[in-house]
C-alpha cells in the first residue's frame, strides 16, 4: 500500500510539474532547446489540455525526466529514463536514449519488472526493446517496463 501511495503521489507531482512547465513556456514565450528555440505558436495544442500534458511530456518523444515530489515532508527526485536496451545484466540495464545518451541504470533486486505487460525477470528484456525505468534519485530503479517486438 505504501508503495502504491508513493507512486500515486509521484504521478500527481509529474502532472503538476507539467502544468508548471507549460506556464513557464507561456510566460517566456518560447521553449528552450539545446539546438533551437520553439515559439509559443509552435507548442502543440495538446499542452492546453491537462491530459495532453502527460502525453506530450511522457509520450514517445521522452528521453528522460526528473520529477520532484514531496513525500512525508521530504523531497524526492524521481528519474525516468526511456530508450532502447543495449545490454541487460542480472542487476543493471544499459539504455540508448532517444537523444543519443547512453546510460547504465542499476535495478533494485526487488523491483517490479514488466515485459510486454507481464511480470518477468530483468534478463527477459532483449536488446532493442523499448525500456522505461523509474528510480528515486540515484537509487536503483524500482520499476522497469519493456516492450519488445514479438517474434
Image (tube, helix red, strand yellow):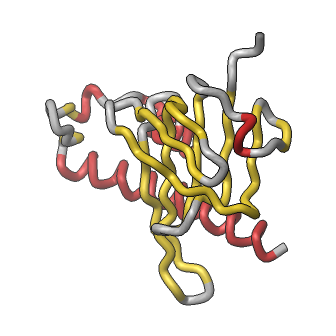
Residue 15: quadrant of the picture: bottom right
Q: Which image quarter is the N terminus in?
A: bottom right
Q: How far across and how far down the image is residue 56, in percent?
A: 48, 35
Image point (58%, 48%), residue name: 133
Q: Position of residue 43 (x, y in %)?
A: 32, 31
The quadrant of the image that shows the C terminus is top right
Out of 139 and 50, give the one closest to the viewer: 139
Quarter of the rendering containing residue 35:
top left
Quadrant of the rendered image containing residue 123: top right
Between residue 149 and residue 22, name the one nearer to us.
149
Please give left or right for residue 135 compared with residue 147 in the image.
Answer: left
The answer to whether residue 6 is above or below residue 87 is: below
Residue 52 makes an appearance in the image: no
Between residue 86 and residue 83, name the one nearer to us: 86
- Would residue 20 appear left or right of 1 to someone viewing this image? left
Res 12 visible: yes
Q: Is residue 83 above or below residue 119?
A: above
Q: Which residue occupies 58% across, 42% down?
A: 132
Task: Please identify the residue farthest to the top as the structure is shown.
Answer: 151
Residue 97 image point, x, y percent:
41, 35
Residue located at (27% from left, 26% from top): 42
Amino acid at each position: 500500500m505504501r508503495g502504491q501511495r508513493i507512486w500515486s503521489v509521484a504521478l500527481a507531482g509529474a502532472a503538476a510539474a507539467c502544468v508548471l512547465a507549460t506556464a513557464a513556456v507561456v510566460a517566456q514565450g518560447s521553449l528552450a532547446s539545446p539546438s533551437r528555440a520553439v515559439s509559443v505558436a509552435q507548442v502543440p495544442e495538446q499542452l492546453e489540455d491537462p491530459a495532453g500534458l502527460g502525453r506530450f511530456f511522457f509520450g514517445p518523444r521522452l528521453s528522460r525526466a526528473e520529477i520532484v515530489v514531496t513525500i512525508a515532508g521530504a523531497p524526492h527526485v524521481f528519474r525516468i529514463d526511456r530508450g532502447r536496451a543495449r545490454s541487460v545484466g542480472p542487476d543493471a540495464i544499459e539504455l540508448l536514449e532517444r537523444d543519443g545518451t547512453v546510460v547504465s541504470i542499476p535495478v533494485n533486486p526487488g523491483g517490479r519488472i514488466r515485459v510486454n505487460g507481464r511480470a518477468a525477470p530483468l534478463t527477459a528484456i532483449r536488446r532493442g526493446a523499448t525500456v522505461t525505468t523509474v528510480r528515486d534519485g540515484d537509487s536503483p530503479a524500482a520499476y522497469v517496463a519493456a516492450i519488445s517486438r514479438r517474434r
